[in-house]
């Protein structure tokens, strides 16, 4: 107890800061948890991009949202997703997919619908996407 009295007497600003900090932490705990212990705050969605190889060796571009996969291509040609941007309910994924001539074509998918960025005459790739 002697230490606490000395500390507060020598650092008067702490008399105000510590109770305020405790009030903030306590208020935050009560606003973040229900009585049953569940959170009232929405959990963030986690997005991951990449590819999955089927048994024939074809890579399918896809992304995962909270562990559930969403395929962006069929299994007819190799494709890979390399970047993602999420805005509200819109999901933009950038990547590359081979065309029927086995040329790598840069493209992005908006909510699963492809948008081709290159003409497919020469190999191309795309690695990042930002939407403003």
Image (spheres, rainbow, N blue to C red):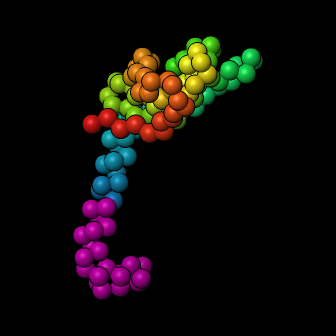
In the foreground, 125 or 8 = 125
Q: Residue at 31% across / 48% down in the picture?
A: 27
Residue 123 appears at what percent x and percent y? 55, 31
Foreground of the two, 107 or 51: 107
Which image quadrant is residue 35 in? top left
- Quarter of the rendering occupied by the C terminus: top left
Task: Evaluate whether residue 63 shows in this view.
Answer: no
Residue 71 placement, left or right of 13: right
Quarter of the figure with residue 104: top right
12, above or below 73, in the image: below
| Main SS of residues in magenta | helix
Does 19 lie within the magenta span?
yes
Look at the picture and state if 75 lies above or below 13: above
- The residue furthest front is 121
Stretch of the chain drawn in magenta: 1-21
Q: Residue 120 magenta-drawn?
A: no
Question: Can see residue 13?
Answer: yes
Percent across and percent down for residue 52 are 64, 25
């Amino acid at each position: 107890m002697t230490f606490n009295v000395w500390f507060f007497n020598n650092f008067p600003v702490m008399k105000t800061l510590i109770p305020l900090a405790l009030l903030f932490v306590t208020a935050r705990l009560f606003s973040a948890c229900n009585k049953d212990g569940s959170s009232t705050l929405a959990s963030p969605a986690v997005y991951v991009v990449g590819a999955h190889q089927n048994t024939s060796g074809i890579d399918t571009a896809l992304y995962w949202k909270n562990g559930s996969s969403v395929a962006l291509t069929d299994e007819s040609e190799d494709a890979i997703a390399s970047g993602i941007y999420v805005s509200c309910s819109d999901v933009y994924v950038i990547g590359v997919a081979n065309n029927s001539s086995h040329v790598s074509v840069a493209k992005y998918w908006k909510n699963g619908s492809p948008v081709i960025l290159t003409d497919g005459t020469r190999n191309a790739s795309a690695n990042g996407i930002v939407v403003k």
